[in-house]
Image (spheres, rainbow, N blue to C red):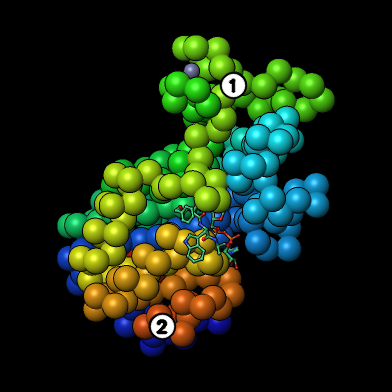
Amino acid sequence: MLNNDSINQAREILRKAQRIAVLTGAGISAESGVPTFRDKDGLWRKFSASELANPEAFRTNPQLVWEWYGWRRREMLKAKPNAGHFALAELDKRASEFLLITQNVDNLHRRAGSQRMVEIHGNIFRNRCTECGHIEPDESCDFDEGGTLPVCGKCGAMARVDVVWFGEQLPEKELTAGFHAAESCDVFISAGTSAVVYPAAGLPEVAKLRGATLIEVNLEPTHLTQIADFSFIGKSGEIMPILIGNVE
Ligand code: BJW
Ligand code: ZN
């Protein structure tokens, strides 16, 4: 159950804020049917995200890693943005300074209409050449049982998915924009993320240290809960529209 006093207080602070930054994670897409990484349904064929989302896994078994991404592309193509995505697109339209920083690679924020956003972990619907770095869009999904793996449209070398794996650097421009927004915002919202993967998990901490009001929306408490000014425990598809104001 939401505490009405605190949600009304948070709504008011958000309504008056000039500069707003938002960090989202897999939980915001859970109600669209996209599996999260670390919840009970987050495993795929008994593998954890950290076993698959790393360069070493791709080097030793590109087939397995591409099969996982093929399965995830299929799930994400079937999915539709939910009320949480739409509420954030609405906030983008309304706020004077705004940045949505998403760790998600699923395109659902864009499909909901968000514009001022950065994808700090890449996008699953792009391939990047392992040799020449050429990037191209790709929605193909069928890599199971010896289906051919994607190659570069320019040089023919093996392609990988254009996302950020463990141990890899995040895209510099996007990350810099994210930290700048965290450092300069009045209100920072962290929604649907376990906030365990760095450097993304450092963004709410930076915002709080710089004096922003930190609002967390998540299905369960995280380590951010203890530093948050407001923590709303529940589904983001239900809480975000109330918080942002398109639902009373
Ligand atoms: C709901 C809900 C509903 C459910 N409503 N809520 C500092 C300290 C320690 C370690 C490090 C550090 N700095 C760097 C590291 C290493 C590493 C790291 O952080 N490791 C930690 C795990 C300890 N970081 C990196 O390697 C990063 N690179 C880097 O730092 O480069 C510099 C460097 C290089 C070499 C050495 C040192 C530094 C790269 C990280 C890349 C992460 N990549 C992935 C895969 C992306 C591509 C893909 O999608 O395939 O990103 S892993 C995965 O985790 C994915 C996610 O974006 C990310 C975060 O997960 P997220 O979104 O929070 O999902 P979940 O499942 O964890 O949580 C969902 C939450 O939603 C839960 O809390 C639910 O309760 C909730 N929920 N339904 C609201 N309806
Ligand atoms: Zn190439």
The residue located at (55%, 82%) in the rendering is 1
Residue 56: give x, y in percent of width and height: 64, 42
- The residue depicted at 38 percent of the width and 43 percent of the height is 171
Q: Secondary structure at mark 1?
A: loop
Place of residue 14 in the rendered image (x, y in percent of width and height, measured from the top left): 28, 71
Please name the residue that numbered disc 1 is placed on: 158
Front residue of 191 and 173: 173
The amino acid beneath tag 1 is Met
Left or right side of 133 for 72: right
Res 135 quadrant in image: top left
Sequence order check: which comes first, mark 1 or mark 2? 1
| Residue 172 appearing in the image | yes
Residue that carries the numbered disc 2 in the rendered image: 227
Residue 83: tell me if it is visible. Answer: no
Q: Amino acid at mark 2?
A: Ile
Give the quadrant of the C terminus.
bottom left
Which residue is more in the foreground, 186 or 240?
A: 186
- The part of the image, by quadrant, that contains residue 96 is bottom left
